[in-house]
Amino acid sequence: MEQVRKKGFDEAIILNRRGNICEGARSNIFFKVEGELFTPALSNGCLAGVTRRLIFTFAKKLRLKTYEGNFILEDLGGCDEAFLTNSMLGVMPLTRLADRPIADGKIGKTSESFLKNYQDLLKK
């Protein structure tokens, strides 16, 4: 993680031995493409985080199809938006992947919606 911070990044994306995205160094990862939400399947080695499970609940409320599967870094490169989740920080929108912006480099509407849902849940 120290190498990641020295390069100016907040999080590292971990790949499993097959080269599939597993998770962030301390988070789960989600990305949206053409109105559908994707996240690595648990079989890739990611943790079944509490906040990860909440995202599935939020997605269902938003009628957003969600798929768990095997994804590579190139899949992230063409996404419309992406975000990370963990219990400490909640929902963390991604605007860049390495040196490239994700979509227009701004927080996406779906990420904002998940962030709001998460914050509203914490207030209860």
Image: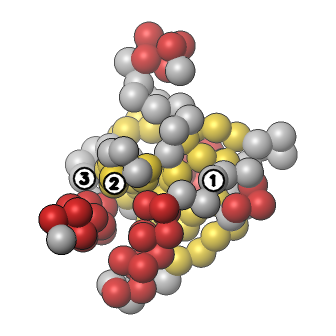
The x, y position of residue 64, in whole percent, is 41, 82
Q: Earlier in the sequence, mark 1 or mark 3?
A: 1
Q: Which residue is mark 1?
A: 47
Quarter of the figure that contains the C terminus: bottom left
Q: Amino acid at mark 2?
A: Val
For residue 69, what is the image quadrant?
A: bottom right
- Check residue 119 in the rendering and tell me which mark sits there, or answer none: none
| Res. 33 visible in picture | no
Q: Is residue 86 above or below residue 67?
A: above
Task: Look at 36% across and 45% down and name the residue there.
Answer: 88
Q: Secondary structure at mark 1?
A: loop
Report the mark closest to the observer, 1 or 3: 1
How many residues crowd around disc 2 within 10 Å: few (fewer than 14), some, or many (20 or more)? many
Q: Amino acid at mark 3?
A: Ile
Report the mark closest to the observer, 2 or 1: 1
Is 40 left, or right, of 94 in this rendering? right
Q: Earlier in the sequence, mark 2 or mark 1?
A: 1
Q: Is residue 9 above or below residue 63?
A: above
56 or 13, which is in the foreground? 56
Q: Secondary structure at mark 2?
A: strand
Task: Look at 83% across and 40% down and name the residue there.
Answer: 17
Distance between the Cα atoms at labels 1 and 3? Answer: 25 Å
Q: Which residue is mark 3?
A: 107
Q: Which residue is mark 2?
A: 91
How many residues crowd around disc 1 within 10 Å: few (fewer than 14), some, or many (20 or more)? some
The x, y position of residue 2, in whole percent, is 51, 14
How many residues crowd around disc 3 within 10 Å: few (fewer than 14), some, or many (20 or more)? some
Q: Secondary structure at mark 3?
A: loop
50 or 114, which is in the foreground? 50
Q: Amino acid at mark 1?
A: Leu
